[in-house]
Image (cartoon, rainbow, N blue to C red):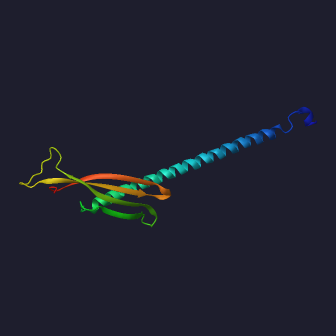
Amino acid sequence: MNIHAIHPRQRGATLIIALVLLLVITVLGISTMGSATLGLGMAGNLQYAETAFQMAETGIEVAINSGPFNDMEPTIIPETIVATTDGVEVGVFNSETAYQLCGGLAAGASLGIGEETYSSYHFQITSTGVSERGAQSVHTQDFSLMGPGCL
């Protein structure tokens, strides 16, 4: 029995269909890999941005804890590298605390000892955090301290 006589028009059709399906699956696989690579890059960049945010916040905490504060010149925390316990660098921060103004106590505040006057000394901290790949975050924090009356 001659197989070509039974199915004369189906010669090689299966091969062509299989190759087309293989091509479609390959294109889908390549595009999925591209999407996964893009997603991984975006997640990495978000992690670097979060690290820079945390470095800026660390700079503010270090500046607040560094006191005492001077109303004549800024307090500068130089560039400080933060590393893990095994020495891997996480990021860098620096900050500057600058005197802003001196004013009376807020309305409704009561602080009086005899005839002495007290004032509120306003300071502002600007902290910059930097992590890998150039991610940077700048934060500003204001705070006030009580002290003897302004001159």
In the image, residue 19 lies at what x, y percent?
77, 42
Q: Nearer the viewer, residue 65 or 72?
A: 72
Answer left or right for 43 relative to 53: right
Res 56 → quadrant? bottom left
In the image, residue 55 lies at what x, y percent?
39, 57
- Kindly identify the residue that appears in the image at 45 percent across and 58 percent down: 131
Seen in the picture, residue 87 relative to 111 is either above or below; the reply is below
Answer left or right for 127 relative to 143: right
Seen in the picture, residue 63 relative to 18 is either above or below; the reply is below
- Kindly identify the residue that appears in the image at 73 percent across and 40 percent down: 21
Answer left or right for 30 relative to 67: right
- Kindly identify the residue that appears in the image at 58 percent across and 50 percent down: 37
Q: Nearer the viewer, residue 67 or 124?
A: 124
Residue at the outermost bottom position:
87
State the quadrant of the C terminus: bottom left
Q: How many marks?
A: 0
Answer left or right for 129 relative to 21: left
In the image, residue 126 lies at what x, y percent?
34, 55
Residue at the outermost left position:
114
Res 86 → quadrant? bottom left
In the image, residue 134 lies at what x, y percent?
48, 56
- Kindly identify the residue that appears in the image at 16 percent across and 44 percent down: 107
Seen in the picture, residue 29 relative to 87 is either above or below; the reply is above
State the quadrant of the N terminus: top right
Residue at the outermost front position:
151
